[in-house]
Image (cartoon, grey):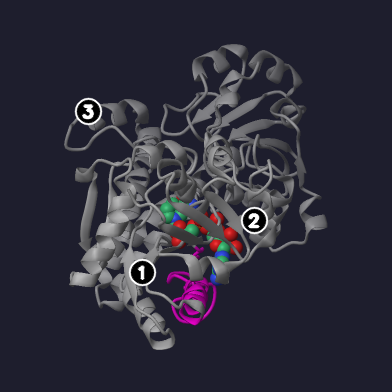
Amino acid sequence: SQDGLKICCIGAGYVGGPTMSMIALKCPEVQVKIVDISAARIDAWNSDNLPIYEPGLHKVVTACRGKNLFFSTDIDEAIQEADIIFVAVNTPTKKVGIGAGRASDLTYWELAARRIAQVAETPKIVVEKSTVPIKTAEAISAVLHGAGKTRFDVLSNPEFLAEGTAITDLDNPDRVLIGGQLDESGQKAMDTLADVYAHWVPRDRILLTNVWSSELSKLVANSFLAQRVSSINAISAVCEASGADVDEVARAVGMDTRIGPKFLKASVGFGGSCFQKDILNLVYLCESFGLPEVAHYFHQVVHMNDYQKERFVGRIIHGLYNTVTGKKIALLGFAFKKDTGDTRESASIDVCRRLIEEKAQVAIYDPKVEEEQVWMDLTYACKMDKTEVQKYVTLCPDALTACKDAHAMAVATEWDEFKELDFHQVYDTMTKPSFVFDGRNILDHATLREIGFVVYAIGKPLDPKLSTA
Ligand code: NAI
């Protein structure tokens, strides 16, 4: 039992919120307090309308909130009382300066660390939950000990949850990774953190390593996952050229136990806040280590993803007789994957931006994404103001409205409800010939063709009625 243990987490986002809620649920004798500089976010966590959508999250939060789980903006107080301080602030790609476009921006991390150093009066275990470049713990340790008045043990504990399945991932993780200094104090800190997870995670799935291995493992895991997506997406182009079917190829290849079946689904491309950022981070690290060949090798994963998105848009434009100017296109899905409202690096954003560049009329529907978020993403991506974007884009309350009078429907997110649409009704409302571009291969293409649609699907034999010139 860890009776009386106090945990604080700085950063109440997609990682901090769910991970700490799960710890609170599994460790009723531990007090967990999540703090953030954004008062709006904290207010939302304390309300019925949580700031992020994640299946099962609401239930976990309401079970613990007010008992051993608290959300607050009083960062200093939370730091002072805590034994363990997780830092789960955002670490986006740097926009300016050295390493811009590749390296991690650690501004938020350093600000959080300096705050800890300033107010901590008793020894703390500081845990890197954010994904950071390797050797960050070392830098953070230097900041903490340089400016602080007490002892700090810095641990690396990267998070492997996937958005959309965060709660089941946290409940039953493949592994928990903890990196620390191999001296006596570091070992003790690692044991304390391992004991927290051991409330529900079997000991043999809690891995203890040195800090650098832990930090690097997170970047490598995301790079390998993204690499599988880019590999099957590259093959999808070969399938379209040859008449092979990418799902059949993926099945045959994935049944090899050395390869495995997961993450072999061809699509319009991966998105999310992590994959691209973490690969670019690895690329930047390799470059700074003087390993240009390794950097180049992993950079191709990102290039392939950009190519796939552009290829999808190209299929739409060529399919619609080489012009989409003034044509209405229904874009179904704006989140980067199903079961989340998160749009960071969503393939939809790039698809939409390209359609706007071609002066199409884009009608967007997504079940979970907030309207303001769409405008923020598109104004940023298109470098236009909102009124300019609104000349090309409308947001719709449902898929049917988006499809009305549209020349084409493009599926960009694999939401289950898109499979359940009444496609006869959709077909009746669309302009003829009516096109479907299935960027996620979730629809029943044979049935759609029977209804009369011209269908393009990723990595599938091409519809003879689809213009490719
Ligand atoms: P997020 O942007 O949703 O949340 C970060 C939060 O930190 C924000 O609410 C922000 O207001 C707060 N914050 C920033 N600076 C602060 C400060 N100095 N003091 C207090 N609060 C501060 O980011 P998200 O998605 O939770 O990611 C956090 C980290 O976890 C990143 O490093 C990311 O790479 C990593 N990660 C993310 C995963 C995901 O699926 N989103 C999965 C695994 C790791």
Tag 1: amino acid: Pro
Image location of residue 420, percent across then percent down: 59, 19
Which residues are the magenta region?
Answer: 89-118
Res. 216 visible in picture: no
Give the left or right position of residue 396, taking residue 232 as reference: right
- Label 1 to label 2: alpha-carbon separation: 28 Å
Q: Secondary structure at mark 2?
A: helix
* 182 over 196 or under it: above or below: below
- The residue lying toward the viewer, choosing from 174 and 467, is 174
Q: Please state the horizontal and vertical placement of residue 361, each as a whole percent of the image.
A: 75, 42
Asked whether 68 or 437 is in front, the reply is 68
Between 194 and 408, which is closer to the camera in this rendering?
194
Where, by quadrant of the figure, is residue 34 drawn?
bottom right
Q: Position of residue 201 (x, y in %)?
A: 29, 42
Q: Residue furthest front?
A: 3
Numbered disc in front, either 3 or 1: 1
Nearer mark to the viewer, of 1 and 2: 2
Residue at 51 percent of width and 78 percent of height: 119
Say whether residue 94 is visible.
yes
Please name the residue shown 34% across and 67% down the image.
283
445 is higher (above) or lower (below) than 62:
above
Which residue: 21% across, 37% down?
259
Residue 255 shows which numbered tag? 3
Provide the residue designation for mark 2: 42
